[in-house]
Image: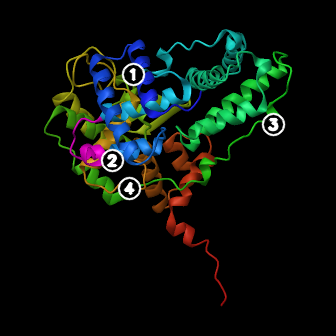
Amino acid sequence: MRTLLLPELADKTFVALKEAGASSYYQTTFQTVARQFIRYATEKDAQTFSMDLGLQFLEDHYSMSERIREGKFCYQYLRSINAMAEYQQSGSVILYLAKDMRNYVFPDGFKESADAYLAYRKSIGFKKKSVQTFSLYLERFFAFLDGKGIRLLNDIGIRDVYAFMDSLSACYEKPTINHTMRAVRYYLKYCYDNQLMEQELFPKIPNPHYNRQSRIPSVYSEEEVRKLLSSIDQGNPCGLRDYSIILLITRLGLRSSDVANLRFSNIDWENEKISLTQVKTGNPLELPLLGDVGESIIHYLQNGRPQTDSDHVFVRQVPPYTAFQSGCVGGMVRAHLQRAGIRVEGRKKGSHTLRHSLASRLLEHEIPLPVISEILGHTTTQTTMVYLRVDMNELKKCALEVTV
């Protein structure tokens, strides 16, 4: 898709939002944010969209960090910037529906091959969530090709794939670019291997160099975690729920998806343990129900949880009293980190960072790596090895003396 000037991008995004069924409130908010963003960009001599510009606008114009810290509602502002990013990249908008609620419709020229490829992924054991994510990436790829007038497999050239990768850099970070290109590479490999296209592109397609193992994971110290927990107001139902959720993550290392999916049947009160099937991996996980964790859950159930037939432990505090979404868990953690006055600059702010922090503390207390892997629900210790890089005391032992 060609790069749009900001006024045109805003107009087209607004039309797409209306067609996608966005609420009237969101439509109004988007128009306001878009106007302010265009004015801000003009002052910066910027004519086109970039995510860096969008995030800087939110900070400069809306003081986003301060708003989050003070608990002021600001989700729609970021949502508006994300909508423009998505439209610039794919020519469509995604209204933050759960991926398994979206029906992906591929162009006629690619539909048969895309459906066959996704069916193949299912047949070899890939989970539904993974298949849905690949559908999203292919949808973006096809939207880009359509913008270039390419509507058949055999019309795709290596330059088109390079151009698509370049277009991703304006809207997405390196991990997303890496995952997107991986989906495209293996889709085209499948098409060639099954004689659906004539030219073999797979060996020539770039594989962006992004190694998640090379990143130093963000962590929060034991003191910062204590400060986070003590800052939560347990004098209201939301505070009781949030405290219990964050305690589950910081003490047991549960993923946000597993916290959101936690059911009463997963808690064995008599034997003091939590047993569940991990949402991400599908593997079973059994953890001890620590005393403070159990007490916080009971306190929430007795004094904070709304009356509802839901079998999920944690539910929304406003009607309908349905299950908590995993994305909401991450947002809630970020909000409490800000409100606690904890310095978050240069560090990630989601619930996964609290898992990193737990692993770091366990390493500091010389807990064996296989035990940490078991606690975090990792299939192998190789996944857990990423946390070794935050154990600075152990790293110092590896330092070599320098002769001068």
What's the residue type where badge 1 is placed? Phe
Q: Residue 345, which numbered label?
A: 4
What's the residue type where badge 4 is placed? Glu
What's the residue type where badge 2 is placed? Glu
Q: Earlier in the sequence, mark 2 or mark 4?
A: 2
Q: Closer to the camera, 388 or 330?
A: 330
Q: Spatial distance from mark 3 to mark 4, Cα to Cα? A: 39 Å
Judging by the rendered image, the residue that carries numbered circle 2 is 59
Q: Earlier in the sequence, mark 1 or mark 3?
A: 1
Q: Closer to the camera, 244 or 370?
A: 244
Q: Spatial distance from mark 3 to mark 2, Cα to Cα? A: 40 Å
Q: Earlier in the sequence, mark 3 or mark 4?
A: 3
Residue 65: in magenta span = yes
Q: Is residue 330 at all visible to an observer of this figure?
A: yes
Dominant secondary-structure state across the stretch colored magenta: helix
The spot of residue 74 in percent (x, y) is 28, 36
Q: Closer to the camera, 374 or 9?
A: 9
Q: Spatial distance from mark 1 to mark 4, Cα to Cα? A: 32 Å
Quadrant into which the N terminus falls: top right
Q: Nearer the viewer, mark 1 or mark 4?
A: 1
Q: Spatial distance from mark 1 to mark 3, Cα to Cα? A: 38 Å
Q: Residue furthest left?
A: 235
Residue 403 falls in which quadrant of the image?
bottom right
Residue 384: in magenta span = no
Q: Nearer the viewer, mark 2 or mark 1?
A: 1
The answer to whether marks 3 and 2 mark residues whose Cβ atoms lie closer than 8 Å is no
Range covered by the magenta-colored residues: 60-74
Quadrant into which the C terminus falls: bottom right
Judging by the rendered image, the residue that carries numbered circle 1 is 14
- Residue at the (68%, 20%) spot, across then down: 121
Around disc 1, counting alpha carbons within 10 Å, would you say few (fewer than 14), some (14 to 19), or many (20 or more)? many
Judging by the rendered image, the residue that carries numbered circle 3 is 204
